[in-house]
Every structure is written in structure tokens, then in C-alpha cells.
């Protein structure tokens, strides 16, 4: 999991600190979320962390 986080972190750091739109896609490459931001890098970084934490939380909730 660390490899994925490092790879994504590098991509986020490469984003401009300018307005823009971003897409989150699922494993089938279908768009599941469209966002717009004043600071693209900050928004993608924050959204990614929230979505990652929610995914981990939902997995933990399913464990019996």
C-alpha cells in the first residue's frame, strides 16, 4: 500500500496550484466524481485522503 501512496503523492505534487476540475474514476475507469477547485493540488490531495479514509473505514466496518 505504501508504493501506491508514494506514487499518488508524486502525481498530486505535480498538479498546478491553479483553478481546475478533477475526476475520480473507479477500477473500470468510469467517472465516479467530478470536482472543481480554486487550488487543484490542494483539492485533489484533500479529496483523496477523505475517500481513502472512508474506504478503509467501510472495510473495517464489515469485519466481524
Image: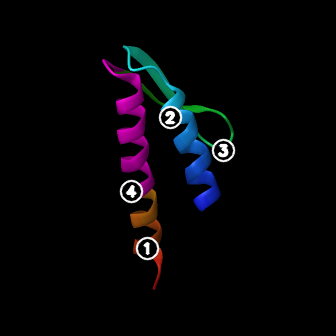
Between discs 3 and 2, the one toward the N terminus: 2
Q: Which mark is residue 12?
A: 2
The coloring applied to the image is rainbow
Q: CA distance from mark 3 to mark 2?
A: 19 Å
For mark 1, give the secondary structure: helix
Q: Residues within 10 Å of mark 4 (few under 14, many from 20)?
A: few
Give the label, 3 or 2, closer to the camera: 2
Between discs 2 and 4, the one toward the N terminus: 2
Image side of residue 24 versus residue 51, left or right: right
Q: Label 1 belongs to which residue?
A: 60
Q: Which mark is residue 54?
A: 4
For mark 4, give the secondary structure: helix
In this rendering, is residue 62 above or below 26?
below
Q: What x and y, as percent, mark residue 38?
A: 30, 17
Label 4 near label 3: C-beta < 8 Å?
Answer: no
Q: CA distance from mark 2 to mark 1?
A: 27 Å
Q: Given the current orientation, which residue lies at the most extreme left position? A: 38
Q: Label 3 belongs to which residue?
A: 27
Q: Nearer the viewer, residue 60 or 19?
A: 19
Amino acid at each position: 500500500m505504501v508504493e501506491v501512496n508514494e506514487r499518488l503523492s508524486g502525481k498530486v505534487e505535480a498538479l498546478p496550484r491553479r483553478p481546475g476540475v478533477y475526476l475520480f474514476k473507479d477500477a473500470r475507469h468510469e467517472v465516479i466524481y467530478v470536482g472543481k477547485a480554486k487550488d487543484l493540488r490542494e483539492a485533489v490531495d484533500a479529496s483523496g485522503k477523505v475517500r481513502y479514509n472512508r474506504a478503509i473505514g467501510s472495510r473495517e466496518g464489515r469485519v466481524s
